Image (cartoon, rainbow, N blue to C red):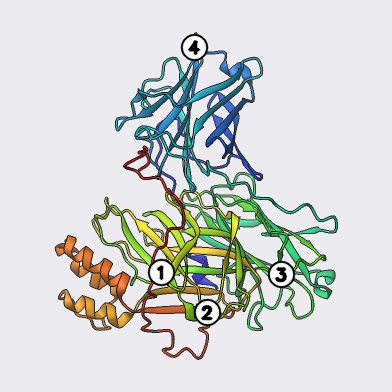
């Protein structure tokens, strides 16, 4: 079993909600070039919320369509709120009051969840069609109001609420609300036109029984039909299919190619840990987790699929997360692949960037913003094709304490841009970002992936590792043309870390696990030790996982990929940004 990939996708734990709150994420999502929509189902109120980004006027236009307009005939209010990181308090909101005035209000929630009206009103009602139940409103990306949410690239938490009469507090007994996650700022991305010769195939679990236990892995292996075996095709779209009613049970899915001779030999449908499951499949083709939608490949590339030399077995692996131990569940989730015989110019692939899964990458308690940076060094990117690669999509990933994630791109030591950034990351919603401007990476370039963690409420270390209470820092990049590289990740060198522990009075020997060494320091941890640890992570030698498609280190490196100097990098001026002191926002 490819445990490295299985556990890289976190168990998404939804927050404990107040009364009348539906924590489920089974709303419908549809995504086009520049518009996104949510189907919102609140008690006694159901509506579609759509929005699009107007970059010329630097504002977001929202449209609300009430599916049953009669539901608004009572004295009801609707709230459309925005905030960060799973919190309700501190939310900025636009509020529509269906009272005698039918007014529109810009406000915020204080730390007691009480509604307060902003001094400066920045929510603007554009149109109200009462008969047909349509509300259109707009607000600027940024208003420089400390009580307003700054719309920026990355994840936004939506607070969607309703109630009767006058809205005073989220604690009012008639208040119902949902928390949703999506991106407010949508850069337009053009997807290729439909291919008339394209066909589809499904790779699904077959009537899989989901047992009443928290974690189950189900594997379904299918064999390609004769047409696919005889001729190479390109997959041009990968779409998840989730069984209705199991949206909160199907945690993540991974699509594998049984590429190696030692991989699975025949079709299979059963528990991945079953004694009948003698061999797994090794090469990752695609992945889905809660929040992700359809993957469209650009016109320049497709995922190679089928043909002579392509072992004709593919597998979907499904992680079921059933914390409530529900009984009698059956599943047939999986993927729908759209493929074509009309090959595009390039084969596409995936590379995993970030930290090696290890407790060497750990975060001390009580930290509001603790950074960890990993490296994909020049020695590894030299394995890229001579002409380089083009990144067209990316999926950032961390666990519960991750707050800001990004990957930077360096050439000749100078930062020339970023692959992707999410300053408002939440593990509740994970998505694959189609890049508006693809990123060209050349052999010898350096990619660094940084995660900033918030452990302010923790009393113990948060260790790097596989479990949800551990942490990760990853970026899966979708690119073309395909290269030999499957993984490019790093961790602080073991011997350097042992010396650091000895400096702080902890035995640096191999007899004690790294996390146990950190635990010995917890009782005397202070800010000076935090600074020492940051210095260790940013300047000490590193070990690299520069892996090929078989999961093995590339041979022939002069140090065996160990004890490597951290790349010397310098940040260049490559983009404008909002200064939080000059232009404040509620999400600073």
Element carrying mark 4? loop
User: Label 4 to label 3, Cα distance in Å?
Assistant: 58 Å
Q: Where is residue 145 in the image (x, y as percent from the top left)?
A: 37, 32
Q: In this view, does 327 lie above or below 169?
A: below
User: Label 1 to label 3, Cα distance in Å?
Assistant: 29 Å
Please name the residue that numbered disc 2 is placed on. Answer: 547
Please name the residue that numbered disc 1 is placed on. Answer: 374
Please name the residue that numbered disc 3 is placed on. Answer: 346
Q: Position of residue 107 (x, y in %)?
A: 39, 26
**Between discs 2 and 3, the one toward the N terminus:** 3
**Between discs 4 and 3, the one toward the N terminus:** 4
Please name the residue that numbered disc 4 is placed on. Answer: 99
**Between discs 1 and 4, the one toward the N terminus:** 4
Q: In this view, does 163 lie above or below 52?
A: above
* Image quadrant in which you'd find residue 509: bottom left
Would residue 509 be found to the left or right of residue 544 on screen? left
Residue at point 79%, 52% (across, down) = 194
Which is nearer the eye, 518 or 194? 194
Residue at point 28%, 77% (across, down) = 497
* Image quadrant in which you'd find residue 230: bottom right
User: Label 2 to label 3, Cα distance in Å?
Assistant: 22 Å
Foreground label between 2 and 1: 1
Foreground label between 1 and 4: 1
Residue at point 40%, 54% (across, down) = 404
Element carrying mark 2? strand
């Amino acid at each position: 079993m490819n445990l490295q990939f299985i556990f890289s996708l976190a168990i998404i734990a939804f927050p404990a909600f107040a009364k009348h709150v539906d924590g489920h994420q089974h709303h419908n999502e549809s995504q086009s070039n520049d518009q996104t929509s949510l189907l919102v189902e609140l008690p006694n109120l159901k509506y579609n919320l759509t929005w699009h980004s107007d970059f010329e006027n630097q504002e977001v236009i929202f449209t609300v369509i009430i599916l049953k307009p009669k539901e608004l005939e009572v004295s009801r209010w609707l709230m459309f709120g925005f905030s960060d990181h799973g919190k309700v308090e501190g939310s900025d909101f636009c509020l529509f009051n269906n009272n005698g005035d039918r007014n529109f209000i810009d406000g915020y929630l204080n730390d007691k969840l009480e509604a307060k009206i902003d001094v400066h009103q920045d929510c603007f009602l554009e149109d109200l069609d009462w008969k047909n139940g349509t509300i259109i409103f707009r607000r600027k990306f940024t208003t420089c109001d400390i009580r307003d949410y700054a719309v920026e690239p990355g994840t936004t938490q939506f607070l969607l609420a309703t109630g009767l009469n006058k809205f005073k507090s989220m604690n009012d007994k008639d208040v119902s609300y949902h928390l949703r996650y999506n991106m407010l700022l949508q850069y337009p991305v053009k997807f290729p036109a439909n291919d008339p010769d394209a066909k589809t195939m499904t790779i699904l679990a077959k009537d899989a029984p989901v047992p009443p236990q928290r974690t189950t892995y189900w594997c379904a292996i299918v064999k390609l039909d004769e047409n696919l075996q005889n001729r190479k095709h390109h997959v041009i779209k990968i779409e998840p299919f989730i069984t209705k009613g199991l949206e909160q049970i199907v945690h993540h899915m991974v699509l594998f190619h049984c590429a190696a001779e030692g991989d699975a030999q025949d079709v299979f449908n059963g528990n991945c840990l079953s004694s009948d499951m003698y061999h797994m499949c090794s090469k990752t083709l695609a992945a889905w987790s809660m929040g992700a939608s359809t993957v469209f490949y650009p016109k320049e590339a497709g995922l190679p699929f089928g043909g002579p030399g392509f072992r004709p077995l593919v597998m979907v692996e499904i992680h079921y997360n059933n914390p409530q131990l529900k009984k009698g569940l059956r599943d047939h989730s999986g993927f729908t692949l759209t493929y074509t015989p009309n090959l595009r110019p390039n084969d596409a692939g995936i590379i995993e960037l970030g930290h090696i899964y290890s407790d060497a990458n750990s975060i001390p308690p009580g930290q509001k913003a603790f950074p960890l940076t990993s490296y994909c060094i020049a020695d590894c990117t030299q394995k890229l094709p001579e002409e380089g690669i083009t990144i067209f999509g990316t999926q950032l990933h961390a666990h519960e304490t991750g707050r800001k994630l990004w990957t930077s791109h360096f050439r000749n030591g100078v930062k020339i841009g970023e692959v992707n950034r999410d300053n408002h990351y939440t593990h509740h919603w994970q998505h694959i970002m189609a890049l508006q401007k693809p990123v060209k990476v050349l052999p010898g370039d350096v990619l660094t992936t940084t995660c900033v963690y918030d452990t302010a409420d923790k009393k113990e270390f948060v260790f790097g590792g596989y479990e949800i209470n551990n942490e990760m820092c990853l970026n899966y990049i979708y690119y073309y043309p395909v290269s030999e590289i499957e993984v490019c990740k790093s961790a602080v060198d073991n011997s350097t870390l042992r010396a650091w522990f000895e400096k702080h009075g902890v035995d640096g020997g191999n007899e004690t696990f790294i996390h146990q060494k950190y635990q010995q320091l917890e009782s005397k941890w202070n800010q000076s030790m935090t600074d020492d640890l940051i210095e260790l992570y940013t300047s000490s030698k590193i070990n690299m996982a520069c892996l090929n498609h078989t999961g093995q280190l590339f041979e022939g490196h002069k140090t065996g990929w160990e004890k490597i100097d951290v790349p010397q990098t310098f940040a260049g001026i490559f983009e404008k940004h909002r200064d939080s002191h000059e232009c404040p926002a509620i999400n600073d």
